């Protein structure tokens, strides 16, 4: 058996050129990347804002649909209202801190005990997004029939005093989302 041993080349016999970037090439690449970031970053932040608004709208809409389904399934009035931070209903129309869902067997529009509380949802983490409901109607009660007593409830998602979306619960209990034509209800 004649085994061949690998040949080791000496530095003198193999002269390869080591490739790399020059300082000018690196500077040009950094300048082009900086221009790309300067142009793309503002549009990226608007995409992030839009996604946050969409997420909050979808979350609120699905929360309402879940409350209606719960009321029908368990034959118990179910209330959704803005959270005051202590898992009780706020008395105003500001939903920005989040919202709660609870059974309301006695009709007092307050969770009477921890067993009544069904779900708690934190508000969006976007500091520029405000969630405001129709004045005079800070909560919605879904009845065992699936209807929502009282008048329609409109909850607007506002940014910079402009309505971005509206979640509307009508008297029959149906929830829909729409893009408002004006910004009524977003003023401070």
Image (tube, rainbow, N blue to C red):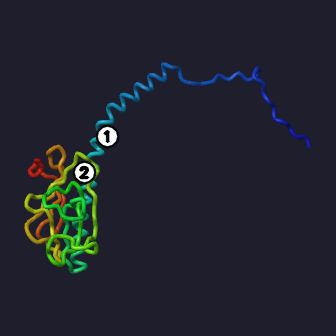
The residue to which callout 1 is attached is 44
- Marking on residue 114: none
Question: Residue 108 location, x and y as percent?
Answer: 14, 73
Query: Residue at image x 24%, y 62%?
Result: 86
The residue to which callout 2 is attached is 53
Residue 49 visible: yes
Query: Residue at image x 13%, y 58%?
Result: 92
Query: Residue at image x 20%, y 66%?
Result: 80
Mark 1 or mark 2: name the one nearer the start of the chain: 1
Q: Up-down: is 131 above or below 10? A: below
Looking at the rendered image, the quarter that the N terminus falls into is: top right
Q: Is residue 57 left or right of residue 20?
A: left
Q: Up-down: is 29 above or below 129? A: above
The quarter of the picture where residue 79 lies is bottom left
Distance from disc 1 to disc 2, alpha carbons, whole Å, reads 14 Å
Outermost residue toward the bottom in this view: 75
User: At numbered mark 2, what does the secondary structure look like: helix, strand or loop?
Assistant: helix
Query: Residue at image x 78%, y 27%?
Result: 9
Q: Residues within 10 Å of mark 1 (few under 14, many from 20)?
A: few
Question: Residue 26 location, x and y as percent?
Answer: 48, 24
Q: Is residue 4 left or right of residue 61?
A: right
Q: Residues within 10 Å of mark 2 (few under 14, many from 20)?
A: many
The quarter of the picture where residue 135 lies is bottom left
Q: Up-down: is 184 above or below 39? A: below
Residue 47 versus residue 112: which sits nearer the camera? 112
User: At numbered mark 1, what does the secondary structure look like: helix, strand or loop?
Assistant: helix
Question: Residue 128 location, x and y as percent?
Answer: 22, 45
Question: Residue 51 location, x and y as percent?
Answer: 29, 49
């Amino acid at each position: 058996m004649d085994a061949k041993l690998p040949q080791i080349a000496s530095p003198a016999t193999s002269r390869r050129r080591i490739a790399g970037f020059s300082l000018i090439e690196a500077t040009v690449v950094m300048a082009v990347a900086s221009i790309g970031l300067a142009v793309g970053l503002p549009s990226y932040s608007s995409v992030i804002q839009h996604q946050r608004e969409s997420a909050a709208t979808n979350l609120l809409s699905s929360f309402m649909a879940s409350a209606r389904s719960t009321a029908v399934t368990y034959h118990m009035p179910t209330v959704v209202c803005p959270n005051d931070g202590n898992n009780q209903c706020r008395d105003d129309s500001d939903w920005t801190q989040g919202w709660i869902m609870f059974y309301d067997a006695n009709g007092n529009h307050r969770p009477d005990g921890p067993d009544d509380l069904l779900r708690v949802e934190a508000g969006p983490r976007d500091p520029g997004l405000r969630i405001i409901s129709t004045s005079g109607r800070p909560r919605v009660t879904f009845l065992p029939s699936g209807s929502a007593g009282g008048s329609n409830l409109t909850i607007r998602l506002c940014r910079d005093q402009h309505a971005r979306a509206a979640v509307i619960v009508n008297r029959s209990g149906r929830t829909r989302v729409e893009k408002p034509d004006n910004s009524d209800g977003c003023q401070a």
